[in-house]
Image (cartoon, coloured by chain):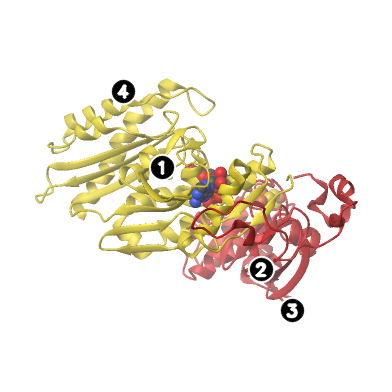
Chain colours: A red, B yellow
Amino acid sequence: MSSSKDSPKSGLSRRDFLRAGGAAATSVTGLAGATLETQAQPGQPPASHIPVLGPGPAKISLNVNGREMSTAVEPRVTLLDALRNYLDVTGCKRVCDRGTCGACTVMLEGKPVYSCSMLAVEAQGKAIRTAESLVDGGKLDPVPEKFVQFDAQQCGFCTPGFVVAMRAVLDRNPKATPEDVEQGLQGNICRCGTYEQMRDAIYSLCNRPRRS
Amino acid sequence: MKDIDYAAPKTLAEAVALLDGKGDRARVLAGGTDLIVQVREGRRDIDVMVDVKRIPDLTRLTVDANGLRIGAATPCCDIYEHPEVKKSYPGLVDAAFLIGGIQIQSRASLGGNLCNSSPAGDAIPALIALGAVCVIAGPKGERELPVESFCVSPGRNALARGELLAAIKISAPRTGSGAAYLRFIPRNEMDIAVVGVGVSVVLDAAKSKVVAARIGLGAVAPTPLLVKDAADALVGTTADDAAVENAASLAQAAAKPISDMRGDADYRKHLVAVLVKRTLAIALERARKS
Ligand SMILES: Cc1cc2nc3c(=O)[nH]c(=O)nc-3n(C[C@H](O)[C@H](O)[C@H](O)COP(=O)(O)OP(=O)(O)OC[C@H]3O[C@@H](n4cnc5c(N)ncnc54)[C@H](O)[C@@H]3O)c2cc1C
Ligand code: FES
Ligand code: FES
C-alpha cells in the first residue's frame, strides 16, 4: 500500500484534487453518510437505506488500550495504518503489509490479529490492545520482561508483534506449555533469527527448565 | 490500496440488496485475509466491500442433534475451540487448525476459504469429505448446494449476482464414523497445500466393515474434487491393505494436477496416494474409537 492517503500527513491526493470542485475534498462522511444508489428488489429493503462509508474519510472511534480515540480515515485505511499514522500508536510495525510476518500483531477482543490485514473501520466497537499495553507505569509485563532478561531481540522490529502474540496465548491459557506458546507464534517471523533466545524467554515464562 | 466504499449491513437482505445493486464491483468482506491482500496488490478491482460480520447469523455456530451449522463468516478459531465441534467434527477441526497461524485463524472463515475458490483451499476437501452443504442467500431467496459443486474453476464459484454464502451445514456424524484432513507442505506450517486430502468413513456396528466413505482432494485439479469411486471402493471392505491400496490408486487416477513451483504433476500424483492412505488411517482410528 503505497497510496498517498495511507497517511494523513501526505497532503492532498490527486483524487482529492480532482474532487475539490465538489464538497468532498475535506468533508467527513459520518456513519449515516453517503449511500449506494441501488435498485430495490421486490421483498427486499431498498439498498439506498444502508449506510455506506467512503471513499472519502469517515469519522471513526477506536478503543485502543482502553482509551477511546477518534479520527477520520478512508475505508481503505488498514487498522495498522490508522494506529500508526493517524493515532500515533506506533508499537505495531509495518513490515510485509500483507499478512505474513506478524510485526503488526495486535489483539482484537483478546484475539491476536494482523492489523495490516483488516480495515480500521472494521475495528470500531472492539477492544484493541497493542504492545504499548504491556507496560504499566514503567513496570513491564512478564513477557517483554523476559525478552529483556534473555536478550530475545536484535533489531527489535519483530518484537512488539511477538510479545503481543505471546501475551494472547498466555491470557487464553495461563498454564500454556512452551509448545502451546510456540504454536501461537507460527504467524510471526524474526528476520534477525533470535528464536533461540526467544525460546529461553518462553521456557522461563512457562516456568520450565530448558534442556540444552 | 485503491479507493473503496465500505458497508456493514446488519441483515442478510440488506447485504443481498447491496451485492445485487453493485454486481461484480462489490465483494463480500469476511475475515479479509484473502480479500484485503488481493485488493491492495491490485489483483482484484472492486468499488465496495460489504462486511458481513455484523449480520448475527453469519458468525453464529450452532450444533444440535441434527448437525452443525456454521455462519459463513465465523472465524476458524471459533470453530476449532468449540467443545462440541472438537468432539464430533475432528475432520473439520484438522483443517480449521492449519489454515494460517493464529492471527489468520482469528479472522479467516470457511466461507472465505470456499468463496476464494482456490484449488488449494484447505477447508474445501475437508468439507467435501464431511458431505457439507452450502446455504446460499440471494435475491430469489435461499438455495442449497453440495460443497463439491460450489467451486467451478480457480477463483470462480457457483454464486450468481447478488448471492452470498450464508452458512455451511454438516449433518451430525453417524455412529461409527470418523474423519480427518491432512495436507502436504514443504514447511511445518504457514504454506499452501501441495496436495490436501479429506476423508470420512462410517463403520458398521462391529466397527469392522466400512459402510460409507467420502474422499475429497485439494490442489490436484482446477477445483477441489470429490473422488467418489475411490471412496466407494472401500465400502463393504474391512479397509484391509488391499482395499486401501485400491482406493489410493483410484484417487490417484482421478487427480489431474498441474506442475508449478510447489510441485510437479508426478510428485503431486505420488502425494495423493500417500496422503489418502495416511488420512484414511486417521479417519479409521477415529471411527473405531467413536
Ligand atoms: C499468511 C496467510 C496464510 C494463509 N494460510 C492458509 C492456509 O494454510 N490454508 C488455506 O486454505 N488458506 C490460507 N490462507 C488464505 C485465507 O486465509 C483463507 O482462504 C481464508 O479462509 C479466507 O477467509 P476470509 O474470511 O479471510 O475471506 P475473505 O478474505 O474475507 O474473502 C475471500 C473471498 O471470498 C469472498 N467471500 C468471503 N465470504 C463470502 C461469503 N460469505 N459469501 C460470498 N463471498 C464471500 C470475498 O469476497 C473474497 O473474494 C492464508 C492467508 C494468509 C494471508
Ligand atoms: S505487517 Fe502485517 S503481517 Fe507483516
Ligand atoms: S529482532 Fe530483528 S526481526 Fe526479530
Marks 4 & 1 on one chain: yes
Dot 3: few (<14), some (14–19), or many (≥20) neighbours within 10 Å? few
Q: Are marks 4 and 1 in contact (CB under 8 Å)?
A: no
Which disc, if any, is residue A145?
2
Discs 1 and 3 share one subunit = no
Contact? badges 1 and 2 (CB < 8 Å)? no
Which residue position holds label 1?
Answer: B124
Q: Quadrant of the N terminus of chain B?
A: top right
Circle 2/circle 3 CB separation < 8 Å: no
Circle 1: is it few (<14), some (14-19), or many (20+) Cα within 10 Å? many
The secondary element bearing badge 3 is classed as loop
Q: Residue at x 36, y 51 (%)?
A: B92
Select label 1 or label 3 by which is in front: 1
Is A26 left or right of B26, judged from the image as shown? Answer: right
Q: Secondary structure at mark 4?
A: helix
Q: CA–CA distance between discs 2 and 4?
A: 56 Å
